Image: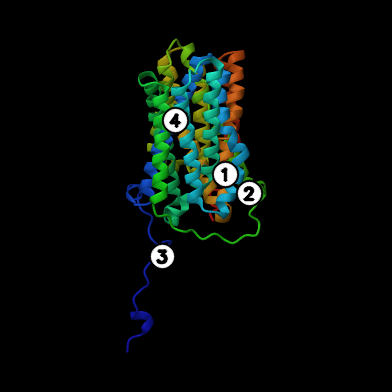
Amino acid sequence: MTHPTTDAPAPPPSSDDELPRSSWALLKDRTFGPFFTGKLLSTIGVWIHNIAAAILVWELTRSTLLVGAVSIGQFLPQIVLAPLSGARADRGDRRRQLILGRVISGIASGGLAVWIVLFEVVGTAGAAAVIASATVKGIGFAIGAPAMNALLPALVRPKELSKAIALGSLPMTVARSAGPALGALMVATVGPAATFAFAGLLSVVFTVIIAVIHIREVPRRRVTDTSVRAGWRHLRADASLSALMLGVVTIGLGADPVITLTPALADQLGQGSGFVGTLASAFGIGAGLGFLVLSRMQVWLGLPRLGVTGLLTLAFGMGAAALAPLPSLAVLALGVGGVGMAFALTSLTTLIQQQVPEELRGRIMALWGVAFLGSRPLAAGVTGAITDATSVDVALAVVAVVLLLGAVTVRPSRVNPYRQR
């Protein structure tokens, strides 16, 4: 007589027990693959809009401060709205929230295109229309970004989250490489109206993808406190998360010059508006190269040390750009900075996602958005004012010093990579 516990077939493994898939397998997955593609196209559209707006405002006003106002308009809503939308993402339908945000973003780009066709865009008044469009686009980001970040665990198996986070940073990396060059080229060839219309279309594509893909339900522990303050309290009580968030703030401050200061840097180097796209794309290409070696660097250094290394490399790139006497050396310096941003942002974001409880994920990732994107208005305003008052070299040097302080903030003794939920 056989023993039932010996001969009974083993139950099928749960998704938690399955081996994590490779990056290539994730990209071919019917859920994560379309999400990745849509995010890539949409992010390229964002960079096309950003660089086109920067070029247009610079050509209309020759004011770095007003170029910075584009970033202020786009990212200031993160500070005001993102915590509220993060709380909404923790208790509501994340898919619908993401769709709403992307629709608003598409309307911002498409609406600006229509405005340029119907009305003459000249001087400060024309720049104001561009800044207003950036503000509407920022509102769309503030609504949709926390939901998009919180959706990530629902797109992959639990053991694949760190790999999905790394892959999730690739669209931004590729977009930084292709978007600025494409945006500058389109402004020069087909004009700003067609450029902004194309950027809006890419947001629509991502919206359709999110509407049709299958997204599984991830259990959330029932909590009585669904307020915005709960996310802030958790962040303040966790010293490791707080240090990581401060590190993300400095990355946002360090990345902003790629938009705000490149028109002035190109002009100082005796180059035309097309070189703005070259500088911004160099930063993106550097980030892409950093991503190629990211896994090996992570194994070699570990996530906390990789974050510090990334911030130091980004600081070096910005400092070298400030001292570059030739256009080619400025391109190389920003490329090095891009490598540093890829290392720093991916490692710190992965550490945050690993440590945050699921029931607070929307709110904490909204604060991540405030840290990374909400810091951009401050950076744009300060570095734009410094450039107008002194020079772009001084502004880049200030950014480099801030990044060095960020590297000290996220030193390995202050963060804990093993606190996973």
Of the residues under marks 3 and 2, which one precedes in the sequence?
3
Q: CA distance from mark 3 to mark 1?
A: 30 Å
Q: Tag 1, which secondary structure?
A: helix
Task: Name the spot of residue 255 as percent of width and height, x first.
Answer: 51, 29
Of the residues under marks 4 and 1, which one precedes in the sequence?
4
Of the residues under marks 4 and 3, which one precedes in the sequence?
3
Amino acid type indicated by mark 2:
Gly
Category of crowding for the residue at label 3, using alpha-carbon neighbours closer than 10 angstroms: few (below 14), some (14–19), many (at least 20): few
Amino acid type indicated by mark 3:
Ser
Residue at 48%, 24% in the rendered image: 53
Q: Tag 3, which secondary structure?
A: loop
Residue occupied by mark 4:
47
Of the residues under marks 3 and 1, which one precedes in the sequence?
3
Amino acid type indicated by mark 1:
Ala
Name, please, the residue furthest toward the bottom: 1
Q: CA distance from mark 4 to mark 1?
A: 21 Å
Of the residues under marks 2 and 1, which one precedes in the sequence?
2
Residue occupied by mark 3:
14
- Which of labels 3 and 2 is toward the front? 2
Residue at 63%, 38% in the rendered image: 80
Relative vertical location of residue 400 with respect to residue 15 in this rendering, above or below: above
Residue occupied by mark 2:
231
Residue 221 position by quadrant: bottom right
Q: For this rendering, which residue is in front, 299 or 19?
A: 19
- Residue 65 as seen in the image, left or right of residue 54: right
Relative vertical location of residue 107 with respect to residue 158 in this rendering, above or below: above
Amino acid type indicated by mark 4:
Trp
Residue at 62%, 23% in the rendered image: 382
Q: CA distance from mark 4 to mark 3?
A: 40 Å
Residue occupied by mark 1:
366
